Image (cartoon, coloured by chain):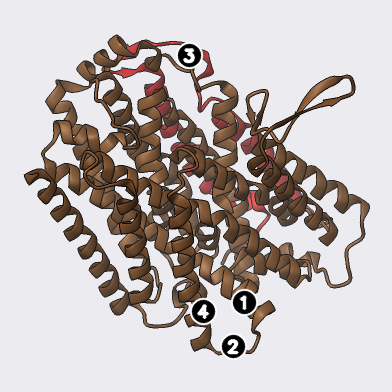
Chain colours: A red, B brown
Amino acid sequence: MRRAMRRNRTGAVWAPLFAVLVALAVPWFLWGDARVVAGLPLWLWWHVGWMGVATVAFYAFTRGAWDRAMGVNRG
Amino acid sequence: MADLAVQLGVLGAYLVVALAVGLVAYRVTSRDAEDYYLAGRSLGTVVLLFTTFATLLSAFTFFGGPDLAYRAGPEWILVMGVMDGILFALLWYVIGYKQWLVGRTHGYVTLGEMLGDRFGSPTLRGFVAAVSLFWLLPYVMLQQMGAGEALVGLTDGLVPYWAGAALITAFMIAYVALSGMRGVAWTDTLQGLFMLGVTWAAVGWVLAAVGGPAAATAGLAESKPEFLALGGGVYTPQFILSQAVVIAFGVTMFPQINQRFFVAKSARVLKRSFALWPVLVVLLFVPAFMLGAWAAGLGVAVPEGANVLPVLLNEYTPAWFAALVVAGAMAAMMSSSDSMLLSGSSYFTRDLYRPFLASDAGERRETWVARVGVALFAVLAFVASLFRPGTLVEVGATAFGGYAQLALPVLVSLYWSGTTRSGMYAGLVGSQAFYLLSVFVPATTVGAFGGEAILFARSYLGWDVALFGMLLGLALTVGVSALTAPAAEEEASRFTEGLSAD
């Protein structure tokens, strides 16, 4: 019972975060924007940065939430 | 002519060396029949990551992506970012980790085996395997098309398309005949690292020749200003999202990817791979696709039926380097085709041949059947590749779309114990039938309800039909499961109880 509650709480934190990661992986707010920064389109820099953010977020998720969200018992 | 000799020399030498390394690797690592996939479950982080990544090192990435960037602009980078960097990583956890847990507890090695056991239905098992093998054909064909187009580009048409396609087919069959099809994961890893290296070297070389990224991009701004603006042309929001979603879900159901969900040594390996995924995506796709886009700005002319990448490299780098990149790409494609064919043959022998055709066949006979089957499969794909039914990205997307139809029913069954066998059949058969009709029957306009409607189109309102098929599969799986009772042989607890990560 307690496990199920912890699982729901973990899901409630991470699911919206993952949704944001997906939603902004394409910088919709730069749609039609052709600005070039340091030799590359601005939106391409957003992509590079966003993948970095995703890696950090994914790493944080693996520190603990990974098994809680799946409801797996460790040990 | 001197160039052609150098190019073919480098190409031939590299492919033979890659084949030889593959054979040696196989001899020194394992002689055990199906050890790699079956008994294994022992792949470490780097190898698992790269061997999965190696599947991305296919003609779809190396040649299809740069081509699309050359013709339509570099936004394909973003599609691959959403798809592989984020969505696939999340599915890696949601489907992959769950399958790893279930597979570890019950000892499954194929998707069909897992579903057939849970739903108490050998027919379901066979059906899933058959569908998977069906969609494998266009994907193997894609490698042959990619090789053919790359050699046309490299040699400026001196080597015809069919010869390139035939060459890679011959190497695929040689791999199978000589090594007995045991893919060795660490040669995938070596080839992946090599390709990552030469891709960056290629970018460095081309950029040095044209005066840096600013100059290359300025050329693009001058001749193709619409390429730099985000969106436009084929890149509608519907196209970007359709492709990203369909391909990400499709990849999880790919035989060689799905089977890798079962082989990780520990949960830690899966976790690390999960977090590293977006980084690898940036490292490979940004340089490869920007090369394609820059080529458009540099005014590189690509001959009919050729691929842009070798043409660009020929113009700005020495002949041997261009040949090395193409050879490396072809070797990587060969090794991923090898894992595809290996997984395909394990689906065939375990889920179709053994249960339905010859339950008493000995191991030797089974191995023989698998080898001949793979050779036939490769030849069939080669013949189909000669017809060139679409661009690389189109053919690839069609195959991914077919696999994507499997993903949602599988996902539902993994998490919802109310899923029934009838629900699974409805979802899997319904969505496959719908998608097959849309792919193979030409679009037809029919009068209905006083208006006109288009049937069997490949997209509706800009959204790929594969997406509608996925939704149909989801609705059917959930709806029919809710209305039917589980059959007596079903064991819902298979996917829920006794799962442990240690």
Out of B91 and B500, give the one closest to the viewer.
B91
Disc 4 target residue: B369
Disc 1 target residue: B353
Inspect this view and state whether residue B279 appears: no
Judge the density around disc 2: few (<14), some (14-19), many (≥20) Cα neighbours within 10 Å: few
Q: Nearer the viewer, mark 1 or mark 3?
A: 1
Q: Measuring from the top left, give residue B453's x and y in whole percent.
A: 78, 25
Q: What's the distance in space between the residues labelled 2 and 1, CA to CA? A: 9 Å
Q: Are marks 2 and 1 in contact (CB under 8 Å)?
A: yes
- Judging from the image, mark 3 belongs to the subunit labelled A
Q: Nearer the viewer, mark 2 or mark 3?
A: 2
Disc 2 target residue: B361
Query: Mark 2 vs mark 4: which is more N-terminal?
Result: 2
- Judging from the image, mark 2 belongs to the subunit labelled B
Dot 2 and dot 3 within a common chain: no
Q: Please name the amino acid that badge 1 sits on.
A: Tyr
Query: Mark 1 vs mark 4: which is more N-terminal?
Result: 1
Judge the density around disc 3: few (<14), some (14-19), many (≥20) Cα neighbours within 10 Å: some
Judge the density around disc 1: few (<14), some (14-19), many (≥20) Cα neighbours within 10 Å: some
In the displayed structure, would residue A41 be above or below residue B179? above
- Judging from the image, mark 4 belongs to the subunit labelled B
Q: Are marks 1 and 4 in contact (CB under 8 Å)?
A: yes
Q: Are marks 4 and 3 in contact (CB under 8 Å)?
A: no
Query: Mark 2 vs mark 1: which is more N-terminal?
Result: 1
Dot 1 and dot 4 within a common chain: yes
Q: Are marks 2 and 4 in contact (CB under 8 Å)?
A: yes
Q: Please name the amino acid that badge 3 sits on.
A: Leu
Q: For mark 4, give the secondary structure.
A: helix
Q: Please name the amino acid that badge 2 sits on.
A: Ala
Dot 2 and dot 4 within a common chain: yes
Disc 3 target residue: A30
